[in-house]
Amino acid sequence: MKRIIAIDYGDARTGVAVSDLTGTLAGEALTIQEWNAEKLAQRLAFFARGRDAEKFVLGLPKNMDGTEGPRAEKARQFKALLEEASGLPVILRDAVPYTHLTLPTKRKV
């Protein structure tokens, strides 16, 4: 089995996580700083080749009501760039169900 690379695409910074060989656990995580989407796609394609990745999973930001806004459109455009640059499939994944995992929480002491 090969690795999966998960991407949280942003205008200036993009979060990247690489799975283990089973595709279940993220082992390597980093942030890439790149403003140019075409250059970012090329950098990620090179990165994926070095990690023997079989596919990308790209977060698709949706509004809390499930509709798609401008950020989702940017993700779809980036998907096309990344597929062309890498030759690998890019799977879009709704990011909303996971947003609560990254939000700060209040702890009762």
Image: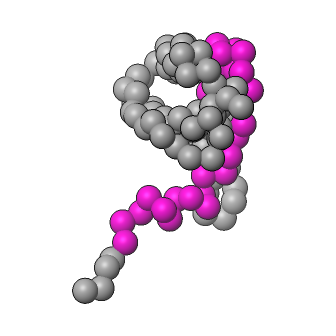
Q: Quadrant of the N terminus?
A: top right
Q: Residue furthest bottom?
A: 109
Instruction: Please state the horizontal and vertical placement of residue 25, each as a whole percent of the image.
Output: 56, 46
Quadrant of the frame with the C terminus? bottom left
Left or right of residue 73: residue 38: left
Instruction: Tell which of 4 and 102 is nearer to you.
Output: 4
Question: How far across and how far down the image is residue 34, in percent?
Answer: 41, 22
The region drawn magenta spans 78-105
Q: How is the image coloured?
A: one colour
Residue drawn 41% across the image and 63% down it: 103
Position of 81 relative to 66 (above/below): above
Would you say residue 93 sits in the magenta stretch? yes
Residue 62 within the magenta-colored segment of the rendering: no
Q: Position of residue 6 (x, y in %)?
A: 58, 38
Q: Quadrant of residue 51?
A: top right
Count of numbered marks:
0
| Residue in view at x 52 percent, y 43 percent | 26
What residue is rendered at 36% in x and 66% in y?
Answer: 104
Depth check, front residue: 68 or 52 = 52
In-image side of 40 versus 52 (left or right): left
The part of the image, by quadrant, that contains residue 81 is top right
Residue 94 percent across, percent down from the top left: 66, 51
* Residue 85 can be seen in this image: yes
Q: Nearer the viewer, residue 90 or 12?
A: 90
Q: Nearer the viewer, residue 59 or 64?
A: 59
Vertical placement of 10 versus 94: above or below?
Answer: above
Asked whether residue 70 is in view, the answer is no
